[in-house]
Image: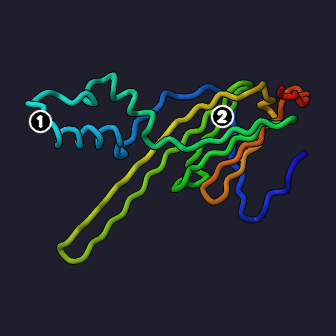
């Protein structure tokens, strides 16, 4: 049940394997912003912020730069859609196992401006790793991926088609 790709759709390579550890980015944290606001209302008298504790930093890492992911469970397949704006197809790495999908992205951008004695250079980098558990076992060898307008879409055929039936609610 393969769909023809449109001209604007680009294939993304999919590989089987295990995921690498999650990397942190330097995006603004709403947790730290909230903590800063609390500091302005209450004088903490030199007390360290609770977000500076290593355990809180691990929890805060979950909200940094993670793509939003939809998992759609259909009868014959599972579709995973991930929003990855600002990334190019070549910057994405997708791997699948029978029970999970791992999406990695690594983006680096550099801009330089020289005018006479004025020199300005900016380097920005963003990366993420997101692993999503799948609702059923899939055939990783038949997985397909496409990328269009900042949305990565994976079509993952199931090993066994689901038999759904309607249940009356009483």
- Callout 2 environment at 10 Å: few (<14), some (14 to 19), or many (20+)? some
Asked if marks 2 and 1 touch (Cβ < 8 Å), the reply is: no
Residue 169: quarter of image: top right
Residue at horizontal 63 percent and vertical 52 percent from the top: 151
Disc on res. 43: 1
Residue at horizontal 70 percent and vertical 47 percent from the top: 153
Residue at horizontal 59 percent and vertical 31 percent from the top: 131
Please provide percent x and percent y for residue 92: 58, 45
From the viewer's perspective, is residue 155 above or below residue 59? below
Q: As drawn, is 89 to the left or to the right of 73?
A: left
**Helix, strand, or loop for circle 1?**
loop
Please provide percent x and percent y for residue 2: 87, 48
Q: CA distance from mark 2 to mark 1?
A: 48 Å
Residue that numbered label 2 is attached to = 95
Quarter of the figure with the C terminus:
top right
Q: As drawn, is 100 to the left or to the right of 62?
A: right
Tell us which disc is closer to us: 2 or 1: 1
């Amino acid at each position: 049940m393969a769909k023809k790709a449109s001209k604007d759709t680009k294939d993304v390579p999919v590989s089987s394997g295990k995921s690498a550890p999650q990397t942190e980015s330097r995006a603004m944290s709403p947790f730290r912003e909230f903590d800063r606001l609390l500091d302005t209302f209450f004088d903490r008298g030199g007390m360290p912020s609770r977000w500076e504790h290593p355990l809180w930093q691990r929890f805060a890492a979950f909200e940094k730069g993670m793509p939003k992911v939809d998992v759609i469970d259909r009868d014959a397949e599972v579709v995973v859609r991930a929003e990855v704006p600002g990334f190019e197809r070549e910057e994405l790495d997708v791997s699948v196992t029978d029970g999970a999908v791992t999406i990695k992205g690594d983006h680096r951008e550099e801009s330089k401006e020289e005018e006479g004695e004025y020199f300005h250079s900016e380097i920005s980098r963003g990366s993420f790793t997101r692993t999503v558990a799948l609702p059923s076992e899939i055939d990783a060898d038949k997985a397909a991926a496409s990328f269009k307008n900042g949305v990565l879409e994976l079509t993952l055929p199931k090993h066994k088609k689901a038999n759904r039936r309607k249940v009356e609610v009483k």
